[in-house]
Amino acid sequence: MTEYLDPTDSVAVPRKTATRPATLDGKVVTLLDISKAQGNHLLDRIEELLRERAAPKAIIRKKKPTFARPAPDALRREIVGATDVVVEGLAD
């Protein structure tokens, strides 16, 4: 008999989502590339649209070393300490 294992957790963990700002004007926006193929192209387009449609204080680009693992703690601290909004981009 073959046994199949479900890798998902059987108990959902409730999570609170971040409050979204009413506008991106005057905000520091970080665009986080998770290192998946072509993700930078998606973030390039998002940056272009942000510059056209909003007036952010700054747009910062960051990149994870690999998509296979969570962002290193130092990178997370750096982003949290310097940004108002994070956009995480991935693509294949």
Image: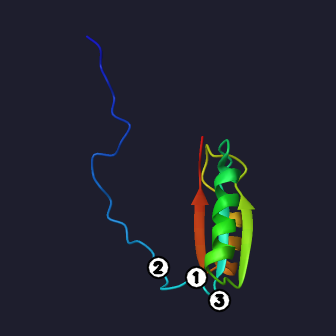
Residue 73: name its quadrant: bottom right
Q: Quadrant of the N terminus?
A: top left
Q: How many marks?
A: 3
Return the x and y of residue 83 as percentages of the image width and height. 65, 78
Coloration mode = rainbow
User: What residue appears at the point 64 percent right and 68 percent down from the top-left corner?
Assistant: 49
* Left or right placement of residue 14 versus residue 82 in this view: left
Residue type indicated by callout 3 = Gly
Most foreground residue, 10 or 31: 31
Q: Secondary structure at mark 1?
A: loop
Residue type indicated by callout 1 = Leu
* Left or right placement of residue 91 versus residue 51 in this view: left
Most foreground residue, 19 or 1: 19
Residue that mark 3 sits on: 26
Q: Which mark is residue 24?
A: 1
Q: CA distance from mark 1 to mark 2?
A: 9 Å
User: What residue appears at the point 32 percent right and 64 percent down from the top-left corner?
Assistant: 14
Q: Nearer the viewer, mark 1 or mark 2?
A: 1
